[in-house]
Amino acid sequence: MTSSPDIDTINSPNVDKEGYSNSAVDPLDELPDEVEMSFFDHLEELRSRIFYSLIAVAVCVVGCFIVVKPLVQILEVPANGIKFLQLAPGEYFFVSLKVAGYSGLVLATPFILYQIVQFVLPGLTRRERRLLAPIVFGSSILFLGGLVFAYFLLIPAALNFFVSYGADVVEQLWSIEKYFEFVLLLLFSTGLAFQVPVIQLLLSNLGIVSSNQMLAGWRFVIMVAVVLGAVLTPSTDPLTQSLLAGAVLGLYFGGIGLVKLTGK
């Protein structure tokens, strides 16, 4: 003889009308805006997002090109009075295009991130959406922090090394194109290297790596930081490479602290 389920069991949200268990889905794992879209609809939306992003980049690049001379003067400050030469016709013009292009890309980044978020948002659960704002905000702040770190520390350190090394042998007259290739590459490589804590938080919240595992691999991380310092810096001086490697290590161990604060 089977006993009938009691009233409290029947009224439980995890039990169906027959009295059998029916485990409910965690609300954080649900898709709040689930919309059926075909493969071609996704492609069309992706095309429009890319198109809007390219328009934003083009507008920002044109705007930066209009005011490119002050931007060039700001980037020349770390050279500390070194004279620049135009070694070929149009060299400064192409340098202006590069500076405007990089600057416009930086200015358009918030709009590009918005387009990316809007594209992936419908496929994210509530739990995953909670990570979006901290990741996007943290990534933007760290990238700007990397630019500031490179501008005020890395670039002056590298330039001072090269100037002092050959000061009694050669006169310092630099090609403006080579200088800006060096500066722009160092700025953006440093900004990308500063994304380490964001990657750590993302991996930990996805359950791929825990803070203890990150801490256990500190020897490997030191080796990777040294390699990154050598690869990402366009100069070959040990001071610049050591500064960038030290910054990456500091960010990595800071990221471990943030991961521990989230309980992962």
Image (cartoon, rainbow, N blue to C red):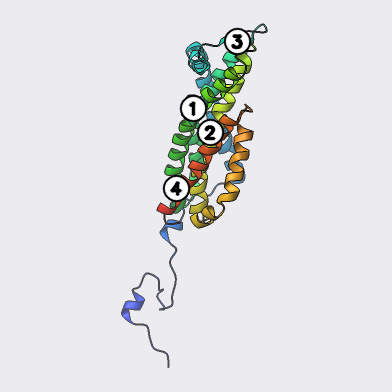
For the residues bearing labels 1 and 4, Cβ distance under 8 angstroms: no
Kindly identify which residue carries mark 1.
153
Tag 3 secondary structure? helix
* Residue 192 position within the rendered picture, expressed as x and y whole percent measured from the top left: 55, 35
Tag 1 secondary structure? helix
Name which of mark 1 and mark 4 comes first in the sequence. 4
For the residues bearing labels 1 and 2, Cβ distance under 8 angstroms: yes
Mark 1 or 3, closer to the camera: 1
User: Quadrant of the rendered structure where residue 254 is?
Assistant: top left
Kindly identify which residue carries mark 2.
243
Neighbourhood count class around disc 1 (C-alpha, 10 Å): few under 14, some 14–19, many 20 upward: some
* Residue 25 position within the rendered picture, expressed as x and y whole percent measured from the top left: 44, 63
Tag 2 secondary structure? helix
Residue 91, relative to residue 254: is it above or below? above
Question: Which residue is situated farthest in the top direction here?
Answer: 89
- Three-letter code, disc 2: Leu
Name which of mark 1 and mark 3 comes first in the sequence. 3
Which numbered marker is on residue 77? none
Name which of mark 1 and mark 2 comes first in the sequence. 1
Taking the spot 56% from the left edge, 35% from the top edge, the residue there is: 242
- State the separation of the CA atoms marked 3 and 4: 43 Å
Q: Considering depth in this image, is 6 or 241 the residue closer to the camera? A: 241
Q: Considering depth in this image, is 103 or 9 the residue closer to the camera? A: 103
Name which of mark 3 and mark 2 comes first in the sequence. 3
Tag 4 secondary structure? helix
Kindly identify which residue carries mark 3.
92
Mark 3 or 2, closer to the camera: 2
- Three-letter code, disc 4: Leu
Neighbourhood count class around disc 4 (C-alpha, 10 Å): few under 14, some 14–19, many 20 upward: some
Kindly identify which residue carries mark 4.
131
- Three-letter code, disc 1: Leu
